[in-house]
Amino acid sequence: MNLKKNLCMTLLLALTATTATAQVYLDPQAPIEERIKDAISRMTTHEKIQLLHAQSKFTSAGVPRLGIRQLNMDDGPHGVREELEWNTWSPARWTNDYIVAFPSLTCLASTWNRTLSTAYGDAVSEEFAFRGKDIMLGPGVNIQRTPLNGRAFEYMGEDPFLAGEMVVPYIKAAQANGVACCLKHFVLNDQETDRFAVNVNVSERAMHEIYLAPFKKAVEQAHVYTIMGSYNMWKGVHCCHNDELLNGILKRGWKWDGALISDWGGTTNTMEAANGGLDIEMGTYTDGKLKESEFGYDDYYLAKPFEKLIEEGVIPMSVLDEKASRVLRVIFRTAMNPNKVIGSQCSEAHYDVCRQIGEEGIVLLKNEKNILPLDANKYGRILVVGENATRSLTKGGGSSELKALRDTSPLEALQAAYGDKIVYAQGYYSGRAIYDQVDTIDPAKQASLKAEALEKAKTADLIIFVGGLNKNRRQDCENGDRESYDLSFGQNELIAELTKVQKNTIVVMFGGNPYSMPWLSQVQALAHCWYLGSEAGTALVNVLSGKVNPSGKLPVTFAAKYEDYPYVKFGAEAYPGVNKQVYYKEDIFVGYRHFSTNHVKPLFPFGFGLSYTTFAYGKPSISSNGKEVMINLSVTNTGKVAGKEVVQIYSTAPQSHLPRPDKELKGFAKTRLLQPGESETLNIVIPRDELKYYNESTHTWQLATGAYTFHVGANVNDIRGKANLTIEN
Ligand code: BGC
């Protein structure tokens, strides 16, 4: 009996002992919050501190003693960046890090296709997972306020609703694979000029309605795991450790539970970093990308200096615990997530996604006399002119540069499709893709390239000009904006002269930004391609040849001239700033909000894009259930070839004392591929919350009651139907 009792006691003790030390934090079945609590209770102060800063260029430490894994990060957002050395920006020269280069995010936004955004997030995160990464540095949803922004190609256009709607599926799909997105750059990083120091002055209303809105949607609807603070300042404080922005708006206001990662070199102060909402400090003292640092990781602001303040009791342990908990949450959601996928690299499925996004993101802007789709039988010799026909556009641009395994150029794809008919002349050159320098252009070389193209044009029956921007400094590249709205390297003059020799000229442009087009009336067709990644040539030729009917629409207004952009009339204070102060004087009237309200005619309006077919819109019907407004309409393909159409809903709010834009995008849908004669009924649901404006006196979102008009448009200036609805409280 006694023996039995003793045995029971021993068993009980053994059981209690196991329960007390049960490693809940390692139990993948345990709720994450319990795992975090358990892990924190086992960690020393120093171990917690180690979680909060870099241990190499692109990793932060875990807790090796406890078997808690480190976080492996990499750029983003268009594919996995090549491996760099542990401590430098130099390539590590691995041979297994060739990847699929996906199209730029402007291209994704141009598809207006949420399903493709899911496919993008899914495919790109599989490549990150396979490369052993836990966090992809991207996507970005800064607003395309100026067409000069060197990084616009990494973002999703000028409209917060479109950017928000398109980024949510991408993040959801990536994170479902156990790879965290790091949404960037929070916030107001809308120019590269003076990006490390410029202080942005913006009204509270514009801040919320325009600049914060896509980030808020990504937090509330996609529960993005990490966010990157921006270099610039707001209210005189760097956004990487801005208490009002990060603790006030993001963490308390939006109830965000993720980890805030600094931009590389964006941290400048321990006290601010500790109290201002920064969780992981990366890239300190590297001056962005320009200088290597001898600075040891223990000397980071959130390393030893922070530890000292904790030990001295200047900053309470609760602040450290909170940051460490946020980082652990990311680790458990990614690196230690039992459901994280193994992923794959350069699979045919990824190339398919890449190509489809390219095909749907290309925007056909002009097509006189239906010169497109191209009937190659009509032409004996097709002259391709332009550096972008052969230049790799996956290279350059800064941190988003990619080491692509496959990089099909337009010329290769045109040759594959049309064989010997294709003749090539470079026409102009732009120099090497260098991040911090611009090559000097030799006028004699430029002139001889031009002369060669003009000579070859004489015997050509059709010209396809392939140019635009590239990823050189001062084109579309990080840490510097474009210098002019005009295209560089003599392209405007070259196109004008080519069209004098041969009027059958099709222009194909790459680039993340709009540009002036003095030659537009002289060319027959124009397609804008953003950047298309690995399958650039194939996607382009599929659209030009009509194998795929274009269905992309602009996520940004193309102005006829630079002066038409809303901030320009306010002078340098409004862009790029004076003495490192920039004032967003156009307020909420960014992009088409300005063009449509102030009746400025753009060259190509927001939402514009042509197709090889035509669509008829049925009469919209509207209803409301108190929470949502529902708009139904049928769309019919009235042309001769199959195609997809993007239908856009713009609201006009009731008159009030507040200035409201003439039209604001509040909903959109894309049809499936409709055969000639086929119809589809679209049901577009607009949550009432989307109709709210930001009230600066109450600091809250409010719904104006009264009569709303919902415009059904093929673009913001091509309204095909209207529905009215009175909205009561
Ligand atoms: C860029 C970030 C990038 C980081 C790491 C910074 O200069 O602004 O977007 O993720 O470098 O390469």
Image (cartoon, helix red, strand yellow):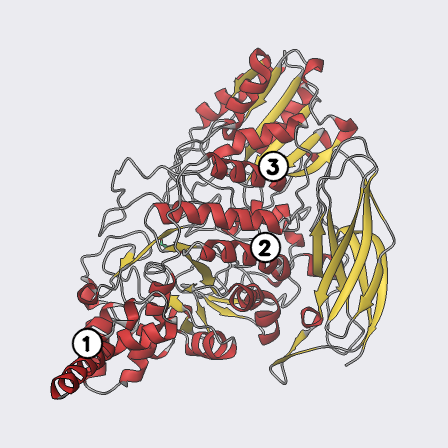
User: What secondary structure is marked by label 2?
Assistant: helix
Left or right, residue 50 beside residue 27: left
Instruction: Give the residue at the far front of this rendering.
Output: 1
Q: Is residue 271 above or below residue 418?
A: below
Residue type at the position of mark 2: Met
Of labels 1 and 3, earlier in sequence is 1
Q: Amino acid at mark 3?
A: Glu
Please, what secondary structure does the residue beneath circle 1 have?
Answer: loop
- According to the picture, the residue beneath numbered tag 3 turns out to be 359
Q: Amino acid at mark 1?
A: Thr
Q: Which residue is mark 1?
A: 44
Mark 3 neighbour class, 10 Å CA radius: few under 14, some 14 to 19, many 20 or more: many
Report how far apart the C-alphas of labels 1 and 2 lie in the structure. Answer: 42 Å
Is there CB contact under 8 Å for labels 2 and 3? no
Q: Is residue 290 visible?
A: yes
Viewport quadrant of the C terminus: bottom right
Where 26 falls versus 308 (above or below)?
above
Q: Residue at x 55, y 55 (%)?
A: 169
Residue located 48% across and 61% down the image? 189
Q: Position of residue 469 (x, y in %)?
A: 52, 39
Q: Position of residue 400 (x, y in %)?
A: 41, 47
